[in-house]
Amino acid sequence: MELHSENETTEQSGARGRKRIVREWLQIVAGLLVFSFGVHGTIYANIGLAPWDCLGMGIAKHTPLDYGLSMTCVAVTVLVIDIILRERIGYGTVIDALLTGNFVQMFNSLNHLPTNKSTLLGVVIMLAGFVFMALGMWIYMSAQQCCGPRDALLVGLGKRLPKVPIGIVEVLLWAVVLLFGWLLGGPIGIGTLLSTFGAGLVMQAVYSLIRFEPRKLRHRSLMQITQDLRGEQGTEE
């Protein structure tokens, strides 16, 4: 009877764990929707490409790859760097890679507003986009199933610069990306500079307001989550 009771308790615990993981996946998707809406806003602002997009265009300009394939190559390269930095790769990383671009495209397709031609309005829209991006990152990173490739890189660098605010770390990262994009001939504009120096500051302000520190999160890897789904005891630290 005791053995049967213990098995039943274990099964119930495993079921609760699986439900929690599914809720976290839904949280990740919700966060990516918010984040993607913010990215869409920065594109709709129509005042210049953000650094990562500038890099993608620059690569496409010098290779047979189109913009989409160029960004895929960038993402894979960043993923390799994440592994070198020993950042954990999890389901959140995979979900981010599969959904974020499609969500941005969805918002672009649904937006039937006329093209923005006002620089001042574009600045306001881009700043609002930064806020949504920061909030989206907060939502999906809080699930602690690892970040997207670029976010994992940001957190990995942040851990190695513990005395530097995470927003400033992003400014430095985006500045380096922008430099390579510019050297490759990627298009830049006032929005590019605003993205490089403004997005990280807006993110820092938002995270300070909601008291969120991504470097304190304890992300679980893809292997750990898979073990939890199977009801196995994880061994990864």
Image: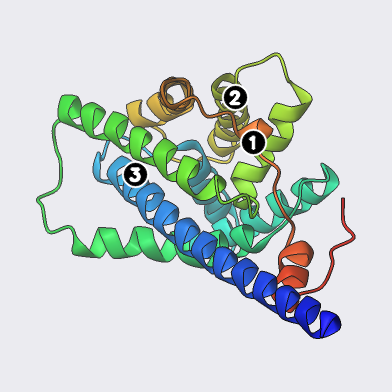
Image marks 2 and 1: residues in contact by CB distance under 8 Å: yes
Check disc 3 and give the amino acid type.
Answer: Gly
Measured in 3D between alpha carbons, the distance from the residue under mark 3 to the one under mark 1, in whole angstroms, is 18 Å
Residue at which label 2 appears: 166
Residues 226 and 33: in front is: 226
Residue at which label 3 appears: 38
Residue found at the far front of this picture: 1
Give me the residue at 45% from left, 27% from top. Answer: 203
Measured in 3D between alpha carbons, the distance from the residue under mark 2 to the one under mark 1, in whole angstroms, is 8 Å
Up/down of 86 relative to 107, above or below: above
Quick one: label 1, few (<14), some, or many (20+) residues within 10 Å? many
Q: Position of residue 80 (x, y in %)?
A: 77, 53
| Colour convention of the picture | rainbow
- Residue 78 placement, left or right of 165: right
Check disc 1 and give the amino acid type.
Answer: Leu
Which quadrant of the figure has residue 202? top left
Of helix, strand and loop, which one carries label 1?
A: helix
Measured in 3D between alpha carbons, the distance from the residue under mark 2 to the one under mark 3, in whole angstroms, is 19 Å
Check disc 2 and give the amino acid type.
Answer: Ile
Disc number for residue 154: 1
The answer to whether residue 237 is visible is yes
Q: Position of residue 157 (x, y in %)?
A: 72, 31
Of helix, strand and loop, which one carries label 3?
A: helix
Give me the residue at 19% from left, 28% from top. Answer: 119
Which quadrant of the figure has residue 30? bottom left
